Image (spheres, helix red, strand yellow):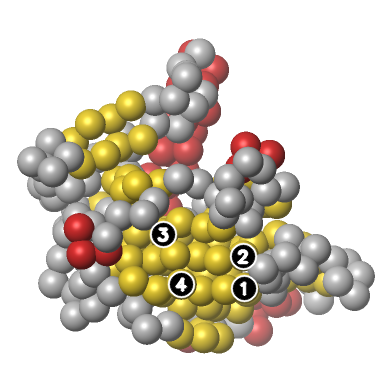
């Protein structure tokens, strides 16, 4: 169908796209949705941007974890202004595990911890709302596609626009995880694209290419460091 013919057939209500939720969990805001894709063979896919702001990142998980028992990172990540929408691109039938702790201020499930087991599947994505700490096992040699949704706020003391992550060491008691305030307002698409452009410009300037980490100490002091 030609593009302009297609536009004439779309009704105004169809422009407001909704997620197709496939499965929920015991933590509200942590759930699986159906992805949009085109088949290029029985198993192969072209994954299309889903409802949201249209940005995406692809994370390749190399052999860094090969000596660890869990084959994954050593720290949880918590975002205050970003919803992660993760599609796990693995086709080797490996079983991955995600560990989650609800850190949202005022949440009825505050500090509830949950583990999910799953295989790679390009036809669905895991949505992780702002303020839910997450870490994954058995990642070596695979790609994670993220279609994040960014949020803004005014004077959120827990949000750092330069590094929107708060990290917690693996093995920490869930009751000792921080309690964070999340951003409330969905960022406009143009601002999301501008932020990505700014990152590309900084990389051309020669800034360090390692992603920084941000930890909160027992007395509430926040420390940021960059791996070498």
Q: How many marks?
A: 4
Label ID, residue 134: 3
Query: Is disc 4 surrounded by few (<14), some (14 to 19) or many (20+) residues within 10 Å?
Result: few
Residue at screen point 55% across, 62% down: 86
State the CA–CA distance, disc 4 to disc 2.
Answer: 10 Å
Residue at screen point 58% across, 45% down: 68
Out of 125 and 210, give the one closest to the viewer.
Answer: 210
Q: Horizontal placement of 148 versus 144: left or right?
A: left
Q: Position of residue 162 (x, y in %)?
A: 31, 34
Q: Position of residue 100 (x, y in %)?
A: 39, 66
Residue at screen point 52% across, 58% down: 136
**Can residue 17 be seen?**
no
Query: Is disc 2 surrounded by few (<14), some (14 to 19) or many (20+) residues within 10 Å?
Result: some
Query: Is disc 3 surrounded by few (<14), some (14 to 19) or many (20+) residues within 10 Å?
Result: many
Single out the mark in the foreground, 4 or 3. 4
Locate residue 204: give its quadrant. top right
Circle 1 sits on which residue? 118
Quadrant of the snapshot with the N terminus: bottom right
Label ID, residue 96: 2
| Residues at discs 2 and 3 in contact (Cβ within 8 Å) | no
Q: Element type at marker 1?
A: strand
Query: Is disc 1 surrounded by few (<14), some (14 to 19) or many (20+) residues within 10 Å?
Result: few
């Amino acid at each position: 169908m030609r593009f302009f013919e297609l536009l004439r057939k779309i009704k105004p209500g169809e422009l407001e796209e909704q997620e197709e939720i496939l499965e929920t969990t015991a933590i509200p805001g942590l759930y699986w949705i159906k992805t949009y894709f085109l088949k290029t063979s029985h198993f192969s896919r072209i994954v299309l941007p889903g409802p949201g702001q249209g940005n995406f990142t692809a994370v390749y998980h190399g052999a860094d974890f090969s000596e660890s028992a869990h084959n994954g990172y050593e720290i949880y990540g918590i975002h205050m202004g970003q919803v992660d929408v993760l599609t796990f691109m693995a086709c080797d039938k490996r079983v991955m595990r995600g560990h989650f702790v609800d850190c949202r201020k005022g949440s009825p499930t505050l500090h509830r911890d949950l583990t999910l087991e799953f295989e790679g599947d390009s036809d669905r994505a895991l949505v992780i709302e702002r303020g839910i700490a997450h870490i994954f096992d058995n990642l070596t040699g695979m790609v994670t596609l993220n279609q994040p949704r960014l949020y803004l706020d005014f004077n959120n003391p827990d949000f750092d626009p330069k590094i929107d992550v708060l990290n917690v060491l693996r093995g920490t008691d869930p009751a000792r995880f921080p309690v964070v305030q999340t951003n409330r307002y969905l960022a406009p698409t143009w601002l999301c694209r501008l932020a990505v452009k700014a990152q590309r410009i900084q990389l051309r300037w020669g800034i360090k290419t390692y992603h920084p980490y941000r930890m909160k100490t027992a007395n509430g002091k926040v420390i940021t460091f960059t791996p070498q």
